[in-house]
Image (cartoon, grey):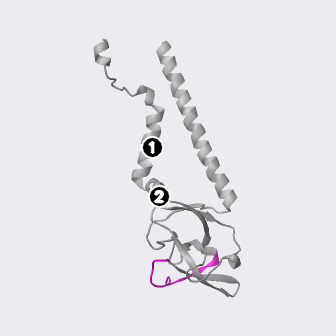
Amino acid sequence: MKQSRLLKSELVKTAILLLIAVISVAGFWLALRAALRTEYPLHAVISGSMIPSLQIGDLVVVQGGLNPGEIYAVPGNGDIIVFRKPTDPDEFIVHRAVNKVYRGSSWFFKTKGDSNLGSDPWEVPEDYVIGKVVGRVPLLGYFKIFLGTPGGMAAIVVLILILLFMDYIPFKRKGAETEN
């Protein structure tokens, strides 16, 4: 009976710690979104189109809420921007702004990957621009890429379940058999 209460107490402590961790991560994410003024403040680089400026697996920090007129757009030295692909708005692309034109009442950007031979075959309307890259963390993007896969999500669920039920999982200790 006393052991049962102890196990329940440990399970409650683990659940509370897990809840605190989840709330902390969610709070951090909301604060990051508010501070960087974008719904998508972090992106993982998944192609080599921006080498040598960005590497596959880099995690880029994106500043949103920009006035499109303030985005610096020149070949080789323009701002690196994150935008929705004009031919598939569900896909995000990280490329350099190489030119911009004000047409009608909107800005349109010409973009290019640093290692690509030519510019992208589209113009990016200002409302497709998520923001510009203001920082990068090498290799951390691989973690974000992994979490976006079914295997990554399954690994997180399994990890959470292991943490919740760790006290109930029997571990074989060295020498435990000789003690009895």
- Asked if residue 94 is positioned above or below residue 164 in the image, the reply reads below
Q: Residues within 10 Å of mark 2 (few under 14, many from 20)?
A: some
- Which portion, as a residue range, is magenta? 113-126
- Secondary element under disc 1, as helix, strand or loop, is helix
Per the image, the residue denoted by label 2 is: 139
| Total residue callouts | 2
Apparent side of residue 160 relative to residue 130 in the rendered image (left or right): left
Question: Closest to the observer: 114 or 6?
Answer: 114
Percent coordinates x, y for residue 118 in the rendering? 47, 85
Q: Nearer the viewer, residue 152 or 100?
A: 100
Q: Could you tell me which secondary element the residue under label 2 belongs to?
A: loop
Disc number at residue 29?
none
Q: Position of residue 50 (x, y in %)?
A: 48, 73
Type of amino acid under label 1 = Val
At a point 69% along the width and 88% down the height, the residue shown is: 104
| Magenta stretch encompasses residue 119 | yes
- The dominant secondary structure in magenta is loop
The mark found on residue 157 in the picture is: 1
Observer-side mark, 1 or 2, equals 2
Q: Is residue 19 left or right of residue 162?
A: right
